[in-house]
Amino acid sequence: MSTASPGDPQDESLHSSSRNMLLWERWRKRRWIRCAVIVFVPFLLLYVLAMAPAWIHNHQLDGLADRFLSHPLPPETDFYDDEIQGSIAIRPGSNSNHCDYRLRFNLETELSVDEVVRYYRSAKIPGIDGNEVDVIAWTSPDMQPHPDNFNQLSIILEVQDYGHGADWDTRCW
């Protein structure tokens, strides 16, 4: 039986001691979480630091694609399919430490290849840094016109923007 009164310092000391023990046990149980954070956060930060240039370049390529796809198609022209290819790399045979952007999509048109190229070159759609891009087009024997469009030509249109800084993007080394 305890003879201590409610305001007795001995009773407060026991209460404080048991509270400290509970805090200590709680801290020990959660110590693995802190250790995991200490171990994994540096790796996460390193990953973000290494991937940031690639994410930035992907965003720039998406902007280039948006500018071209939001521009009206040439007359008597439609997309052949919904596939749009984009890449960021170094052109074969060129020096390293820069990024080259390439955007490719397929069109079906009644115009000639030269007319489609002239249409996009005259549109002056800005590239990554606001400069002019190179537009080329060609036909492929693998792309046959749809059965209901006999007089349409299937072409591949490629937009190229060369010589941008690599900024530590490993695809451009």
Image (cartoon, rainbow, N blue to C red):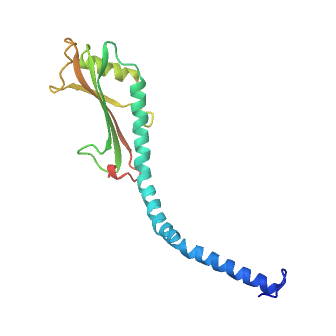
Q: How far from the left and from the top, in percent, is residue 40?
A: 45, 65
Q: Is residue 115 above or below residue 160?
A: above
Q: Nearer the viewer, residue 163 or 46?
A: 46
Q: How far from the left and from the top, in percent, is residue 55?
A: 42, 47
Which residue corresponds to the image point at 37% horizontal and 20% vertical from the top-left?
122
Q: How far from the left and from the top, in percent, is residue 3?
A: 82, 88
In the picture, the quarter occupied by the N terminus is bottom right
Which residue corresponds to the image point at 35% horizontal and 45% vertical from the top-left?
99
Outermost residue on the front side: it is: 1
Give the total number of marks visible in the rendering. Answer: 0
Outermost residue on the left side: it is: 141
Q: Quadrant of residue 117?
A: top left
Q: Nearer the viewer, residue 158 or 14?
A: 14
Q: Is residue 75 above or below residue 26?
A: above
Q: Is residue 96 left or right of residue 4?
A: left
Q: How far from the left and from the top, in percent, is residue 70?
A: 42, 24
Q: Nearer the viewer, residue 5 or 115?
A: 5
Which residue corresponds to the image point at 39% horizontal and 32% vertical from the top-left?
65
Q: Quadrant of residue 22?
A: bottom right
Q: Is residue 4 left or right of residue 54?
A: right
